[in-house]
Amino acid sequence: EFTLEESDGKLVVQTTKLRLSIKLAGFFCTWKTGGVTVLRDRPTQAYDFGWWDGKPRHYLVHDRNERYFGLGERSGDTDRAGRRFRMSNVDAMGYSARNSDPLYKHIPFYITLRDGASVGLFYDTLSDCTFDLGAERSNYHGLFRSFTADHGDLDYYVIAGSVAEITRRFTWLTGRPAFLPRWSLGYSGSTMSYTDAPDAQTQMAGFLEKCEQHDILCDSFHLSSGYTSIGDNRYVFNWNRDKFPDPAAFVRSYEEKGVYLIPNIKPALLHDHPLFAEAEAKGLLITAADSTPEWVQFWGAAGAYLDFTNPATRDWWKAKVKSALLDYGMGATWNDNNEFEIVSPAARCHAGAAIESKPLQTLLMMRASREAQVAHAPDRRPFLVSRAGAAGMQRYAQTWSGDNYTSWETLKYNVKMGLGLALSGISNTGHDVGGFDGPKPDAELFVRWVGFGIFMPRFSIHSWNDDRTANEPWMHESVTPAIRDLILLRYRLLLYLYDLMWKYASDYEPAIRPTFHDF
């Protein structure tokens, strides 16, 4: 409920928690909560609806006492003040967790905290966009912060309340989090080196044997894309029968040990993919202006993205997920490399300009994968994991902070990345424990990373080390007992974590919290 007053060129809209004053001449907005001004349009040229260069812009006053939190998965400190961020989902392998930008996800939402008051600001756009949170200076405009979108309209939501209330309300607004199966909270093994090896099926069997040998508890394994390889490249829905002579028997061998397989799937087809001609003939690909495939660089060769805004593509995708994976006994999907790095303004998809709907493609890919799993096993809660994403991705999948680099600095700033995601509605997260890219971790770094990782909803030790070794619980003999005990502690906490995930799904409460969320 609200009241509305108009007088002397001013409009005032007020609810119990939020007061909006609009100066009609020039349309300047001031937002207050609890008597504190939390948002104020810049007094000089606060809005641009594309008059200058087609890009909508919004400028707000920046105060040095303000702190900004959120924007999803960002590098650096939890407080985003003083930095500029670009949202354009990219495959950022080996990123610096301290300063790399952009990264994998598109969540244009942040919380402003000042003088004991807080407010949330959500720009509802799928466009690539830029946030400047006090980095730029101007003698003519004073201190300011800004939002710029490359395309589209300027629609934004203002959310009042405490940090906790804002986080819950934004999560509610963008969609109820999926309540995933309990086994998804167990230790998940993973490494690219197993499925890249010529004897991949033997390597995978050896992992189970070593888990038993070292008394390591394990619930799932992320099956890297090497199982789809032809030569050095990846071909989604293809099984390499030299590496995996009998996929059904392989899946069954893991099922008998109580370990779920999570196969990697990718939304692009390389030019020489066995299914490329079929997909092109059926109009399932993102195209150039002349209706030929929109070529992109993908895994070392030219390829084209599937167009998930096309209902026919989603149906085709679901059928392939079923026949290539679910029918063999798989019970999950790992939606990877799904940043949809389209750069040409002329590229077209079923929904229009492809460059304007990249995060939507990612969400629709997740949804299609989920629908395939639900149709195949309606009595089981589906499990999905996705690397890229957008606001609302919590409705479908668990996620992680992408292909991180092995260093103490990464461990430090991955903690902050998880907090940024949780304050942006996405709590079912984790990180590649031990580091994905770069040197293998030494014994102490590995122990400390596992000691942090066991407290995150997604706990997976994963790697593609420079020397092609694998990050495994037993990789350093001197600390294997410590790793085993930490994993055991994880399982002792499993019901507690499961309860946190239930509260997240039912009450929108973040499972991962900075102290200022509660205090």
Image: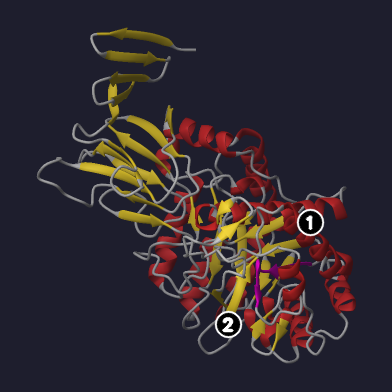
Q: Is 306 displayed left or right of 140 in the figure?
A: right
Instruction: Determine which residue is flagged by label 2.
Output: 301
Q: Residue pushed farthest front?
A: 290
Magenta region, main secondary structure: strand
In the rendered image, the vertical position of residue 62 relative to residue 277, given as above or below: above
User: What secondary structure is found at the residue carrying circle 1?
Assistant: helix
| Amino acid type, mark 1 | Asp
Instruction: Determine which residue is flagged by label 1.
Output: 315
Residue 322 falls in image quadrant: bottom right
**Residue 104 locus on image (x, y percent):** 50, 61
Per the rendered image, the range of residues in magenta is: 260-270
| Amino acid type, mark 2 | Ala
Residue 294 visible, this orientation: yes
Q: CA distance from mark 2 to mark 1?
A: 26 Å
Q: Nearer the viewer, residue 318 or 380?
A: 318
Are there few (<14), some (14-19), or many (20+) residues within 10 Å of tag 1?
some
In the rendered image, the vertical position of residue 200 relative to residue 435, given as above or below: below
Q: Residue at x 70, y 51 (%)?
A: 367
**Residue 148 locus on image (x, y percent):** 35, 47
